[in-house]
Amino acid sequence: MKTESILDQHNLSKTPCRVDIINTLTSVDVALTENQIKKNLKFDYDRATIFRTLKTFSEKGIIHCVPVEGNEVYYAISKPNYKQTLSHAHFHCNSCGGVYCLNSISIAEPQLPEGFSANKYELTINGCCKKCNE
Amino acid sequence: MKTESILDQHNLSKTPCRVDIINTLTSVDVALTENQIKKNLKFDYDRATIFRTLKTFSEKGIIHCVPVEGNEVYYAISKPNYKQTLSHAHFHCNSCGGVYCLNSISIAEPQLPEGFSANKYELTINGCCKKCNE
DNA sequence: GTTAAAATACAACAATGTTGCAAATATAAT
DNA sequence: ATTATATTTGCAACATTGTTGTATTTTAAC
C-alpha cells in the first residue's frame, strides 16, 4: 500500500518524518530497531520525534513491535489485517540479527492451564536466515 | 532444587546476592523484571551487582529471559533441561502483567520459508491469567 | 493567504544498561 | 582458625534509551 494512503486511512497528516519512516519500513521488508530505522531515514530527525512517531504508529496499528529475547525492540510494518489476526510469527536470525515477519505461518493453539484464557499468540523462531545460510 | 546446589553445579560461589535472587525467583514461580526482583530481595544490593548477577545466571542458563512485546525484560528460573529444549512457551497476562513459564506446552514446528533453519521456538501467549479471570 | 490544530526540534530529565576500580568477602590451602 | 588468592560487591561514572514540556514550525482546512 502507498505510504500516503496508510496515513490517510488513520487520519494522520503527511509529515516528512512519518512518510520517511513508513517508506523505510515498507522498503526493507524486515523488522528494524529504532536505531536501524534512524540510519535508514533520508533526513536526521530528532530522537523524540522518531520516538513519538513510532508510538503513534504502534497505537494506530500501522506498525507492531516484535518480542525478541533480550532488550532490543524491533518494529515492522503491519499487514492490513494484523490486529485482527490472533497469531503472529517472526523469525530472528542469530547470525545477522535480522527479524522477519512470517505472515503465512499459523500457530496451532496450545492447551492452556485451567483458568487461563488467551487472545494473542506470538511465536518467535530463532535460527539462521536464508542469506546467512548461503 | 536447592539454591546451594544450583550454584555448586555451575561453579559459582555462594554469595548473598546470588542466593537471594535464586531464592526469590524459585519461590515466586513466575518471571519477574529486574525491579520486581530487586523489591523481593531480603537486602538492598547495588543495581550493578544485580545486573551482573543476572547476566552471569543467564550465561550459565540458571535463568532465562522471556521475550515479551515492548521493552520490559522478564527473568525466570530455568528448569534443568531448559537449554536442551527446543521450544519454550510463556504466558503474559494483559491484566496483571504477570509472566508464567508454561513448561508443559510443546510447540508444533511450523513450516519455514525456503532457506531458513530454526534452532529455537519461543511462544508467548497473551491473555488473562487464572487469578485475573476469577 | 490566513488560521487553528498538529508535528517537530530542542532541552531536560528518568530509567536502564554497562564498566572500572577499590574495598569487602568467599573459598581453598595451610 | 589464619592466611592467601580469586572473586564479588558497592560506588561512581558514563552510555544508551525512554519520556515529557514547550516554543517554533508545518500541515490541512477555510
Image: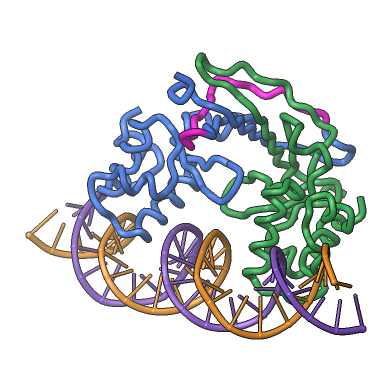
Chain colours: A blue, B green, C orange, D purple
> Does the magenta stretch mainly form a helix, a strand or a loop?
loop
Instruction: Please tell me which residue lies in front, A24 or B22.
Output: B22
The C terminus of chain A sits in image quarter: top left
Q: Is residue A128 above or below residue B56?
A: above
Instruction: Please tell me which residue lies in front, C22 or A62.
Output: C22
Residue that appears at 52% across and 48% down: A72
State left or right for residue A49 relative to residue B50: left
The N terminus of chain A sits in image quarter: top left
Q: Position of residue C28 (x, y in %)?
A: 83, 62
Q: Position of residue C9 (x, y in %)?
A: 25, 63
Asked whether residue B35 appears in the rendered view, the answer is no
Residue that appears at 28% across and 55% down: A45
Instruction: Please tell me which residue lies in front, A88 or B61.
Output: B61
Instruction: Please tell me which residue lies in front, A23 or A37.
Output: A37
Q: Position of residue A24 (x, y in %)?
A: 33, 38
State left or right for residue B95 relative to residue A92: right
Q: Is residue A94 magenta?
A: no
Which quadrant holds residue A62?
top left
Q: Which residues are magenta?
A: A95-111
Q: Is residue A110 magenta?
A: yes
Q: Position of residue D4 (x, y in %)?
A: 73, 75
Asked whether residue B111 appears in the rendered view, the answer is yes
Q: Is residue A130 above or below residue A77?
A: above
Residue that appears at 64% across and 27% down: B119
State left or right for residue A77 relative to residue C21: left
Residue that appears at 43% across and 32% down: A30
